[in-house]
Structure formats: C-alpha cells, structure tokens
Image: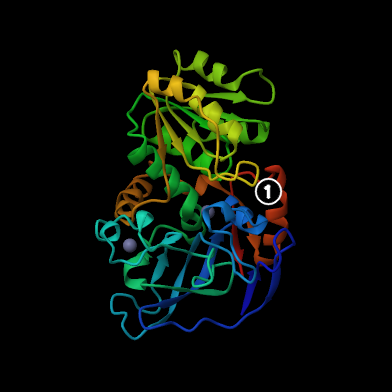
Amino acid sequence: MRAAVLEDHGEPLAIREVDYPEPGPDQVVVETEACGVCRSDWHAWQGDWSWIGAAVREGQILGHEPAGVVAEVGENVETLRAGDRVTVPFHLGDGTCPHCREGRANNCDAVVPLGLTGSAPGAFAEAFPVRKAEFNCVKLPDDVGFAEMAGLGCRFMTAYHGLADRADLRPGDWVAVHGCGGVGLSAIHVADALGAHPIAVDVREEKLERARALGAVETVDASAVENPANEVKAIADGGADVAIDALGIAETCRNSIASLGTCGRHVQIGLTTGEEEGEIELPVDVMTMQEIDFRGSFGMPLSRYGELFDLIEQGTLEPDAIVGDRLSLEDVPETLAVMDDYGTVGIPVVTDF
Ligand SMILES: [Zn+2]
Ligand SMILES: [Zn+2]
C-alpha cells in the first residue's frame, strides 16, 4: 500500500509503497478514508520535541487525525467488526492505567501517539493499525462524514476540551484566541457555540476573515497594531476571561497571558517550536497578583466524544466548517512545506489515498 513517510527531517515526505499492516491480537486495521494535516505533523517533520524526548524518528508514517473503516480484526477483538466506521484519538491509551480507567486516555501513563512513534504507524497511508482497539476506537454516528470527522481530529476536539473542560468556559465570557490556524479557528467556533464572545488574533487577514465567518465578534490584526494584548483588553472590558495560545510560540503565549483580565484563565494548546525548545519566560509576579491561571490542555478524554457527537447532531457544532482544502496523499509533502509560513487556512484533509 502507499504511505507518506518521513525519511529525513525537513526534506519532503516520501510517498512510497510499504507493507500492509497485520493486526496484532488486540488490534484492528483501519482503511483510511480521511486524515487531517496538522501543525503537529509539521513539528514532527522539522524534528522538534527532542527537548521532551519525543523527536519523531526517520522512517515514521505520519498522520494522526483519521477516520475510516475497520478492515481486519485481531483474534481478541470482540466489540469491533469489519465494516465499522471509526475514528481514534491521536493519543492511543493503554486502557488500563488509572487515567484511562476514568476515560482520560489523553492523560494515559503509557500513551502512544498515533503517527508519531514507531509502534503506531500513522494514517497518511491506505491503512493503519490501532493498538488496544476496543479501548481506542470510537464508532462514528451515521450522520458524521469521514472528512468532517478527520476535521474533528486532534484540533477540534482539543479546542473543545480546552474550552469546555480546562478553561471552565461560561456563557458571556470574552475569549481571546491567539493564532487562527486549525485549532484556533476550532476554538473560535466552539467558543461561539458555547455562548462566549470570541476575539480572534492573527497576522493574516484571510485567517481573520475565516474567524469572523466562524463566530468571532471582533478581530485583531497583530501585524498592524503596536500591542495586540492591549487591543484585546480594550475590546473585552479590561481583559479577556479566557485566552488561548493556539500556536505555541513565545510571542503568542505571552500575548495570550497579557490579554487576560484579573482572575483570567490562560489555556496553552500549542506546543513550542525549535525557537523556544519548550521554555517561555512569563510575567510571574503579575500572574500571581492578578491570580491568572496557566492551564495546559492536551487532546480530549474519550468520555467526551458522546457530548461532542450530540452537539454536532443538534447543529450546535459544525466541524465541517473548519475543513479547508481536500487533498490527495501526494499533496501532503507540499502542504507541510506551506506551513513554514503558516499558509494553510482551516484544516486541510486528505481524502484521496
Ligand atoms: Zn493534529
Ligand atoms: Zn492509560
């Protein structure tokens, strides 16, 4: 089968023939119908994350935002069968640690990230295996399409968990979203759907335009103003209640914190680049005196999919609205290259393998 393989960091991914996966006893093999292209793929491609011991090795098949159809079932798997329409979160849990047992595979003690480590080949391929399949596979409702589900992939669900759970979002809150890539636009849409007032901050007009279409009540072009955080404060009656760094660079992280009012909640969703190597200086005294929270947010607990599907069914959430270009597997290397300059709009999804 064909797959997009990381052969050298920074060099275009190779589209080449690889062996079709064999399911282990607890695994299934899923034939890929759609897979989102994400900034995490770009980080992996760049060779980032060595500072947390997680640099992706050469030879890896990337792709971690899939939806597809179960094709092969391991001998111990009873609750899934060929033909089931499924997705999996990018954080494949072991299903047995205390966090997994509480439904929080995103906090698993022995997490295996799909498409980012050797034991979990990714979904930029005609098919991919899923470890602990009964635990990790999520069956799709009939009315959720594959591309829509891939768009829901890591960014939409991360935005949902970040706002609904980690930020304790309340209707009427001002939410400043710094960086309007896939996760940022998802956060705008989710904040609007949950009754908050999202403010979009980015340096590109086409992303701000998309943000307005998705529910941003105000936008700030960070390339055109002296201090984006002050602009947010002027809009949000003294400061945002919730601010999100949806990018993971020092500037957006600090702008996010600086745009908050007293007792504001900063949610860090973006992981940092080779510039920061995981370290960002923060105004600790101001944060202490104003009781500003810094909260990390990573993926989404498996237990939250049901609520997310309900909101989609009701029409409150429309992950389809975030999906950008639909691509073929051959387009993946070039799409990653465009991310060097933050050139993609919305969530590009591979639908042709
Ligand atoms: Zn992703
Ligand atoms: Zn676990």
According to the picture, the residue beneath numbered tag 1 turns out to be: 339
Q: How are the residues colored?
A: rainbow
- Residue 126 lies in what quarter of the image? bottom right
Q: Position of residue 246 (x, y in %)?
A: 53, 39
Whether residue 223 is visible here, answered yes or no, is: yes
Q: Residues within 10 Å of mark 1 (few under 14, many from 20)?
A: some
Front in this rendered view, residue 67 or 300 = 300
Taking 211 as reference, is 274 above or below it? below
Q: Is residue 323 left or right of residue 71?
A: right
Taking 190 as reference, is 91 above or below it? below
- Residue 17 lies in what quarter of the image? bottom right
Front in this rendered view, residue 317 or 253 = 253
Quadrant where ligand 2 appears: bottom left
SS of the residue under disc 1 = helix
Q: Position of residue 52 (x, y in %)?
A: 52, 53
- Which image quarter holds the N terminus? bottom right
Whether residue 240 is visible here, answered yes or no, is: no
| Residue at x 36% of width, y 72% of height | 132
Q: Position of residue 293 (x, y in %)?
A: 38, 30
Q: Position of residue 10 (x, y in %)?
A: 72, 58
Amino acid type, callout 1: Met
Asked if ligand 1 lies within 8 A of label 1, the reply is no
